[in-house]
Amino acid sequence: SPSSLASIVTLGIALHNIPEGIAIAIPCMAARPNQPFLAFGLASLSGLAEPVGAFIGLIVLRLRSVSGLQHNDVNEIIGYGLDDSSMETSSLAHGQDMGDALAFVAGIMLAVAICELLPEANRQRKDCDDSDSFVLGVVLGVGIMVLTELYLGG
């Protein structure tokens, strides 16, 4: 159901923002230990990327799915001016555009992981005494993704 999906996505974003904020705040605190509010501010600012991106994505999906829009009133674009009958017939309500959007985001995430994260982890592995941690991390990460997919009934 849509509310169940929304709850899962909200929980995922919230859990993701914790290590993301820590990853941004710690180097800021190391560089400027006398300015803890700078680290807090930058970590908080980085957390705004998801809601801003979601809002932009919502607008794009609504523009694609709503036909017959007479003018570009923002309230109509994001759904406040739409009646229930137009939402029932839109492809967004049936999930077609949502599948496209999720596939696009998954492709971006894979590209970042393959082109940026794995090569950096491999470079760090060469400088580390415990080179098995790289393989263990990759296997553990893939295992968690598979278990999550099985749990959610993918």
Image (spheres, rainbow, N blue to C red):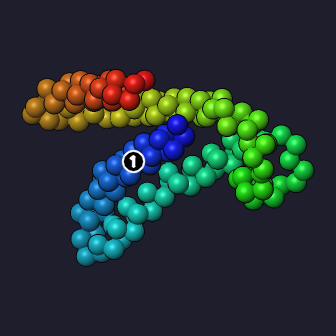
Q: Is residue 63 left or right of residue 127?
A: right
Identify the residue at image location x=78%, y=50%: 83
Name the one closer to the observer, 56 or 122.
56
Farthest right residue in view: 70
| Residue 74 vertical position relative to residue 108 in the rendered view, above or below | below
| Residue 5 vertical position relative to residue 118 in the rendered view, above or below | below
Number of residues whose C-alpha sits closer than 10 Å to that of mark 1, classed few (under 14), some (14–19) or many (20 or more): few
| Residue 96 vertical position relative to residue 28 in the rendered view, above or below | above
Q: Is residue 142 left or right of residue 88?
A: left
Residue 154 x, y percent position in the rendering: 43, 23
Q: Is residue 74 left or right of residue 133?
A: right
Identify the residue at image location x=43%, y=57%: 47
Residue 105 x, y percent position in the rendering: 53, 35
| Residue 67 vertical position relative to residue 144 in the rendered view, above or below | below
User: Which quarter of the figure has residue 81?
Assistant: bottom right
Q: Is residue 24 visible?
A: no
Q: Could you tell me the amino acid type at mark 1?
A: Leu
Identify the residue at image location x=39%, y=68%: 41
Residue 52 x, y percent position in the rendering: 56, 55
Residue 143 x, y percent position in the rendering: 26, 24
Farthest bottom residue in view: 34
Q: What residue does disc 1 label?
A: 11
- Judging from the image, what secondary structure is the residue with disc 1 in? helix
Name the one closer to the observer, 82 or 48.
82
Q: Is residue 151 visible?
A: yes
User: Which quarter of the figure has residue 134?
Assistant: top left
Name the one closer to the observer, 96 or 28.
96
Identify the residue at image location x=52%, y=37%: 1
Q: Is residue 82 left or right of residue 141?
A: right
